[in-house]
Image: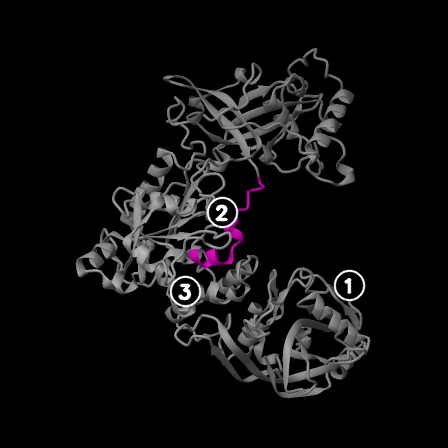
Amino acid sequence: MSHSDPYIMSGAIRPHGKKTQPPISAGSLGQQDDLVEYFTRRKEAIAQGTRRTFSINEPHGCVKCQKISINSDTFEIPDAFCLSDHLSDAVEMAIDGCAFYEWLVDLLVPDSDDPQDEKPFLGASSSDITFYIELNTRRKPNPYMLFQISAELIAGDGEYTTHTLFRGSPEVWTTEDNLAAPCIRHRPFELDKASRRTMRFIHDCLQTCRASHTECRYMKGEAPHANSEIIPVSELPTRLLQIAPDGQSAKLVVTQDLPDVAQQNISHQGYASLSYCWGGPQLLRLTADTFNEFTDGVKIDRLPQTLLDALRVTQELDLSHIWIDSLCIFQDNPSDLELEIARMPLYYSANTVTISADSAAACTEGFLGRGSTEFAAGPFEITFTTPFGPGSIQLFKESSEKPIAPISRRGWTFQESMLSRRMVAFGEIQAVWCCNVASTGCGGISADIDSDDRSLNVAGNSVTMASMLQYSFEDAWDMMVQEFMGRTLGVESDKLLAIGALASRMADVALERKFSRCYLAGLFVNTASVVSWARQLLWLVDPQTARRPQKYRSPSWSWAAVDGHWSHLHVFLPPSYHLRYYNFSFKVTDFKVELNYPKAPYGSVRSAWLEVTGFARRMNGIPQANVIFPPLSKTRLPKGKRTVADLLLFCDTAADRAQVESALQGCLTDGNIFLLEIIPPYLARDTPSVGLILFDKYRSEIEMSRIGAYVFYFTNNETGIQAYEQFYDGVLEACRIV
């Protein structure tokens, strides 16, 4: 078979050889036409998603696949186990109802939508196929590929090639009490998130992390204690819930009012913090009216289920104090809210562990119920013989479509996750541990708590800041903003508040890295660098889904001014080694941000402006350019599609686009539209002019607001350069963008 055969979808091809082909069985599917018809039906079934799948407790097992037996000796001598001598045999077993052989033969169905790939994998160049399963010695000990499936294509003259079917490399696990357990390290998901196994798992993970992971003890560079961690009393939350030893009640304590010995106990023992979705107004919350009641003690049966579950988990972790925002921050006091939110970096980074209620969409739902999981194939129960007798394993393929946890949609919980050094997340399937060193689940295919293999991250929606800080400061902040902008907030005015604690922590990172960065309403700017200003100002949002809040919450030049999926134009930023060739006219000559609460420098803002100067064009009628409104994914225009001059307009919202279209038609009556160049072109690199779209509501040319960004391409010849020189009207001076 040729290496260019379209049906070798993904596989390692071994050298050709010759062998005597076993006699073809006298089954009903020996004819090529019958096989092609079967593959055609299977391709349609797969496209419709009708493949049979099973569950952990009820895996597939039938008389056909019970004949398969993998020997534990395979781990010593990596021989391949023949699953079928002939393709027709495998197909007949699939037709007879064996789900394992059905999946096996499905691996030969091409997953391409190319019309040329309509024929099945076997093609005309092979007369038969033999299936094997073998130990994957080349990728060991990667648990994702402990076993691999291969297909041996045998031609009529005995010529054969062997292809590894990577799509068919199954995951494998077995139960703790199975005879195969000493050979197979992985266990099935523990779907019962309230079981003793789950509670033992999270307890052991915390103890191991506290004892062994020095990277998880501190985020600020202090020397770690030998075998313990002590939270400074000054970094304890203002208020905590103290759980009664019998677990039947909890009371609010004001930490600074506690005796020194009680403060030291919390400092040494630690405390947990809860990250969860409110899911609407909280019926039980801290206010001036409920303060005395909370300090006296509240029976746990009054708590919503998520909070009740959190108290149980806290005790299972051998902790007696927990911080919960709705019960530890005065919800009727804006000043306390702002100041406590400003202290959240301490509450999540200095705590012992964060409990994340990933699967609960509201505080009334709880998170210790039974999880569920879907499989792309299997599980298939296969016999696994050991020196002690026959055991069994389950082969399966996990579904690539993972459930989206409700907590991953909520804006507030993002910084809670990012700031935490350690987290136990209760997801849709199982409990998962995530810290600065390791990520592992209670069952499933994941690394152990003491593994240094960070590639096996099963935390899903819950990741710590350490995973982001491996990137540059700017890239890390961009990724955080992008993730945050994809989430929602119950109160739209909370945009800057909900990321303020994370911004505070990033400001510390900038100091640690000796960077000069100024935080301005969501932007981290090196105010002495025009490239830094360009990077922070040239963001994009999708106008089809983006919207502005009804009330002011940030200046228009900040991404916090809109809600919507975030992107950027960083591809056009000049590299440092070419910077001297760029003739920037754009400058930020002054700026001001007025905070609502000066003691919360990373909180909400009352007003802000930038004073800028630079080349600008007033848009009144269609310019001498090809005007395009491209999607966010099309920020670059290929050379083959360019004209002499092309203007790509990225408006922030649908209403902004309507204003721009009116200006292009020369009929905008309630203001003017300007294009302000931020990044000039560099002809030697054939780069475009890039800038902001501004709306001058009062036609004063003194105060404007951002409504989008643009990219102006022109050909690198006399005609194109002339188009660029005529594009801008002149210099816009001392204009304030608000």
Work out whether residue 58 can be spotted.
yes
In the shown orientation, is residue 693 left or right of residue 337?
A: right
In the shown orientation, is residue 467 left or right of residue 222?
A: right
The secondary element bearing badge 2 is classed as loop
Q: Judge whether 332 appears above or below 360 on screen.
A: below
Of callouts 3 and 1, which one flags the residue occurring earlier in the amino acid sequence? 3
Q: Residue at x 71, y 21 (%)?
A: 156
Instruction: Give the CA distance from mark 3 to mark 1.
Output: 51 Å
Question: Which mark is drawn over residue 640?
Answer: 1
The secondary element bearing badge 1 is classed as helix
Q: Closer to the observer: label 3 or label 2?
A: 3
| Camera-nearest residue between 667 and 239 | 239
Q: Residue 339 placed where, x, y %?
A: 39, 68
The amino acid type found where label 1 is placed reads Gly
Q: Residue 344 placed where, x, y %?
A: 39, 62
Instruction: Give the CA distance from mark 3 to mark 2.
Output: 26 Å
Would residue 401 be counted in the magenta stretch? yes
Pointer 3 residue:
341
The secondary element bearing badge 3 is classed as helix
Work out whether residue 225 can be spotted.
no
Q: Judge whether 611 appears above or below 1 on screen.
A: below
Q: Closer to the observer: label 3 or label 1?
A: 3
The amino acid type found where label 3 is placed reads Ile
Circle 1 crowding by C-alpha within 10 Å: few under 14, some 14–19, many from 20 = few
Pointer 2 residue:
460
Q: Residue 457 placed where, x, y %?
A: 46, 46
Q: Report the magenta residues as a range.
A: 400-416
In the shown orientation, is residue 175 left or right of residue 98?
A: left
